[in-house]
Image (cartoon, rainbow, N blue to C red):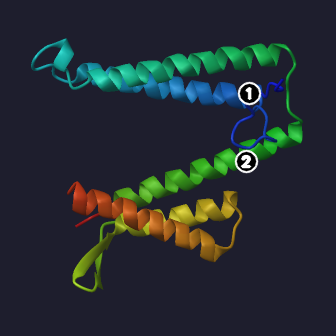
Amino acid sequence: MEESQKFAGEDENAGFASPVMDLMASGALIMLSVWIMIESVRLDMPGGLATAPGLLPFLTAGSLCAMAIGLAVMAEKRRREGAETAPSEEIADLRRTLVLVAIIGTYLVALSVASFDYTVQLGSWRLGYGAFEILTIIMLTTILLLYWRKSIAQCLTVAVVWSTLLAAAFRYVFTIPLPGSI
């Protein structure tokens, strides 16, 4: 007979986050999903409810809200049972989270004020790099250095390849202009 194995997440040594962190995450997810649900209801319904453009975002946000409420209930139950992590681990997690929030905030502010385009010629193909690509490469490299902890060359390579492929798909396949493009 096989032994039953329980799911432990992507990192089997990670375990649960602290109940306080789960409560904070669920609160943020609930606020985000309620906001998206409100905005989706505000969209016009040209043909009726079945063809409303806000229907899918509303349902998606509603399911996210339900999952976040479930996370909050489980976290509160674990908190009442006394399932806490060591204070030093919780402080370290909180610091890492705050650093990530600061990095993402800086990225969003930089995207809102920066606007430029560079073009790179690759044979007969012109590849445009705007503020979105450059800032994404810088921020993604920074995040990877802090959390992945590989060499700067590996982090930069992943950031450049990923950002270039993603931006090229939006620019040249879907023809969607990216933030910061002139």
Q: Quadrant of the C terminus?
A: bottom left
**Few, some or many C-alpha atoms within 10 Å of disc 2 (few <14, some 14-19, many ≥20)?**
few
Residue furthest front as drawn: 1
Q: Quadrant of residue 10?
A: top right
Residue 177 in sight: no
Classify mark 2: helix, strand or loop: helix
* Above or below, 75 relative to 133: above
Q: x%, y% of residue 67?
A: 55, 20
* Above or below, 164 relative to 49: below
Q: x%, y% of residue 74?
A: 70, 17
Residue identifier under label 1: 20
Amino acid type indicated by mark 2: Arg
Amino acid type indicated by mark 1: Val
Q: x%, y% of residue 65?
A: 49, 20
Residue 67 placement, left or right of 147:
left
Q: Which residue is found at the position 42% from the left and 70% from the top?
A: 134
Classify mark 1: helix, strand or loop: helix
Residue 17 in sight: yes
Q: Which residue is found at the position 52% from the left and 62% from the top?
A: 139
Between 11 and 171, the one lying in front of the other is: 11
Residue identifier under label 2: 95
Q: x%, y% of residue 119?
A: 28, 79
Q: Quadrant of the N terminus?
A: top right
